[in-house]
Image: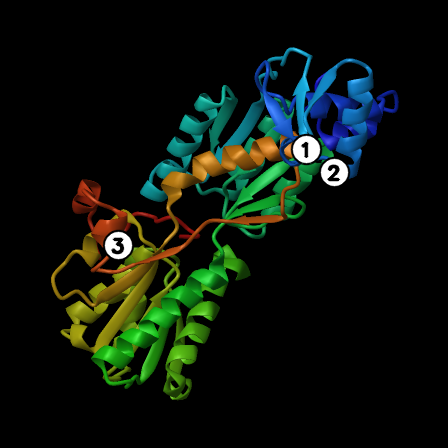
Amino acid sequence: MSAHMSPAAQTRDRYLVKSIIHSSQLLSAFHSPGEALPLKEICARCGLPKTMVFRLLYTLEKCGMVDKLGQNLYQSRVRPWKQRLYRLGYAAQGTDYQFSREVSEGLQRAAAAEGIELISLDNRYSAKTAQRNADLLVREKVDLAIEFQTDEEVAPIVAAKYREAGIPMIAIDIPHPGATYYGANNYEAGLIAGRYLGRWVKEHWHSEADEILLLELKRAGNLPRMRLSGLLVGINLVLPSAANCRVTYLDGDGELGPSFEAVRRHLRSSHARHVLVGAINDPSALGALRAFQEAGRSENCAVIGQNASPEGRAELRQPKTRFVGSVAYFPERYGENLIRVSLDILNQRPVPPAVFVEHKLVTPGTVDHYYPNDALAQLVRTEPSDSSRQHLAH
């Protein structure tokens, strides 16, 4: 019997004997012949409570299936069995842009390294496609689904399909009801950006600021918008005088072109001398910066982005840029962590409802530290004429 049946499958099968399932989970914690493990490590690997593990070990020892070595070490006499091949379903956000490509490539590498079959589909930034892909993965009876789609209104529909099929789900960056969330800690990322922007104003503008311009992405929903909420709080924590600034929200749709046009229109009526610009992502931030440059008002702005994407990193390397920083999300690390969380769920180990990525502030002074030899950034176009659609939540 597999030690890795989903909780939903166990609930449906009234003939299952739970104590045998728990014993199987415990024995699967021993990965190689002769491996000796302390009680704490066994609990961590099998995801069962300490008191239950202790009683199971005691019983298995009496049955001759486990040896106790010394005070707190245990060794299994059962030869470790090869875990069955998991089949994971992955619905990618899209394949056209760097962030989503890095997530997909990292996930494929990590799945291959763990011997996991990964069924990869492309949501193509389309709500209808995301629903069709969910139906397909349900028909394929995957053990777990990883969803990367950023339409908040479709999230409950997609989540319901997996829930009704008893398939556990991980949602990347946009919450889906009942799914484990993996991705940005949006409010914290905003705080990091806001605090730095406040310090920058103190150092370069003697604490003088007239306007705060925020480029949002309304259709991605409220969670990504927390980046901008956190940014405002961060600015005010460091720069209390900013509470008197005019705050203007513009919908740049997370893209360079629309953000450029929105800020261009705004600058026709705004003559503020010291403008702080915070954006939902780097393409939007760069669109705002290009509008200030076109108007000959670069010196009037300080712009900060989110994601530290290749185009953002390229701008950070420009001499005297007013793109003063970006908060990194490290999409190249998503894959390995997603596979780890997937295995924890499938092996019934404790998993928090939200698993956040680690964020770091990247500035012109630190970009080479976090991204040394970043040749890719030099190839990315950042002109307003680039109307290509950018990563929604980043």
Residue 107 in picture, x, y percent from top left: 44, 32
State left or right for residue 149 relative to residue 329: right
* Mark earlier in primary sequence (1, 3): 1
Report if the CB atoms under discs 2 and 3 are less than 8 Å apart: no
For the point 61% across and 37% down, the residue is 169
Please tell me whether residue 162 is drawn above or below residue 9 in the rendered image: below
Task: Work out whether residue 26 or residue 148 is closer to the camera in this orientation and state it.
Answer: 26
Q: Amino acid at mark 3?
A: Gly
**Which color mode does the image show?**
rainbow
Residue 180 in picture, x, y percent from top left: 61, 44
Question: Which marked residue is nearer to the observer: mark 1 or mark 3?
Answer: 1
* CA separation in Å, label 2 and label 3: 47 Å
For the point 50% across and 37% down, the residue is 338
Identify the residue position indicated by label 1 in the image: 39
Q: Amino acid at mark 1?
A: Leu
Identify the residue position indicated by label 2 in the image: 50
State left or right for residue 315 relative to residue 111: left
Identify the residue position indicated by label 3 in the image: 312
Report if the CB atoms under discs 2 and 1 are less than 8 Å apart: yes
Please tell me whether residue 85 is drawn above or below residue 365 in the rendered image: above
Please tell me in which quadrant of the rendered image residue 30 appears.
top right
Residue 324 visible at all = yes
Mark 1 falls on what kind of element? helix
Task: Work out whether residue 283 or residue 308 is closer to the camera in this orientation and state it.
Answer: 308
Residue 114 in picture, x, y percent from top left: 49, 23
Q: How many numbered discs, if any?
A: 3
Q: Amino acid at mark 2?
A: Lys
Question: Which marked residue is nearer to the observer: mark 2 or mark 1?
Answer: 1
